[in-house]
Each structure stands twice: as structure tokens, then as C-alpha cells.
Image: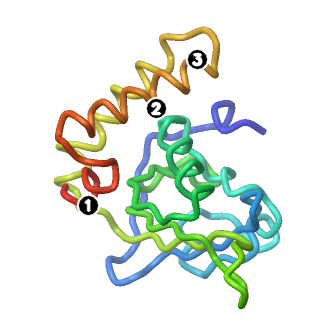
Amino acid sequence: MRADKLVVTGRERFFPEKDIIVSKTNLKGHITYVNQTFMTISGFSLHELLGAPHNVVRHPSMPRSVFKLLWDTLEAERELFAYLINRCKKGDHYWVLAHVTPSRDAAGKVIGYHSNRRVPNRDVLQGTIMPLYEQLLKEENKHADRKAGLQAGANLLTEIANRENKSYEEFILGL
């Protein structure tokens, strides 16, 4: 089921600052490992998560252009930090600061991806990320063609970072 067809409640959930949400996926983004913190905050069971596409927790308020950047960065075998809003099983949501990295085998070949997610800074969320994501979503939704909307959002995201004379990574880590 597409994330934009799922129920959202508008209620935010929180997890303890000392906790880290951990997941691993294969190269196609299907979940191969989750920790207890992931299951607790999302409301999904281990059985529901293992083998599922990681976008099972995608919130419809999350700009697709940020995920495009994420996948482009991972395919280039680089790590990425990003603020994400995720949807819980019953429609609540939670925010994270994600650090996503390629996982490698003993020979150095990328075999999947590993993500650690922490409690984000509320001031950064409310002052920068939430307005930015609203702007990106508005740009993406202006276009009847989803691919054109995705590209327009990605272009806007790059333009915003460039205005600061920074890469996306420098922009996010500087917040």
C-alpha cells in the first residue's frame, strides 16, 4: 500500500534521547534487521518489518526529493545525514535525524545499507526543516507528473543548499 493512502493521525510520538533507532536493508531497501527501539516507536512487529520495504514507515508529509537525494547518495557509495518524518503503524508520526551508510562485505563490496536514527533538535526541526519540507512538498505537488514533481523538488533542494554555498550534507550538518 502506498504511504500516501495510509491513515495519519497528526499525533507525534517521541522516543528517549538516549535511544537509537537502528535498521539494516538489502540493496533494494528491504529490511533485514531492526532493533527494539524501531519496533517500539513504529508499532510494527518484527514479523511485519523483516523483508518489508523500508518505506513502510514513509510519512506522506515527507518530500520525495529528500529520498531521491538519499538514494542518489547511497548509490554513489557515500553516507548521508537527513531529517525524516516517519509514520507509525497506526498513523502517528515521529521525527528523526538519520545517518545512513552503505554496508560492505569483507571485500569492500556494498551489500546493503545501515541507518542509525537519533532524536532530532526541536529548534532545527521547527525553525528550518519543517518549513523547508513544506516548501519542497508544495513544489513537488505543483506538477501533475510525479517524476517532474520529484525532479523539481530535488532541484529546489539543491538550489537552497547552493544559496548557502554548501553541499546538502554541509547544509544539514550545519543546522
Q: Is residue 75 above or below residue 65?
A: below
Rendered image quadrant of residue 105? bottom right
Query: Decide: marks 2, 1 in contact (CB < 8 A)?
Result: no
Q: Is residue 133 above or below residue 76?
A: above
Alpha carbon separation for disc pair 3 and 1: 28 Å
Residue carrying label 3 = 148
Q: Nearer the viewer, residue 142 or 119?
A: 142
Q: Position of residue 101 (x, y in %)?
A: 54, 70
Alpha carbon separation for disc pair 2 and 1: 18 Å
Question: Going 39% across and 71% down the picture, which residue do you hit?
Answer: 118
Residue carrying label 2 = 154
Image quarter (top left, top right, bottom left or bottom right) of the C terminus: bottom left
Residue type at numbered disc 3 = Ala
Q: Position of residue 98 (x, y in %)?
A: 44, 64
Left or right side of 37 for 1: right
Residue carrying label 1 = 173
Question: Going 78% across and 39% down the picture, which residue do you hit?
Answer: 1
Q: Nearer the viewer, residue 92 or 112?
A: 112
Residue type at numbered disc 2 = Ala
Crowding near pointer 1: few (<14 within 10 Å), some, many (20+)? few
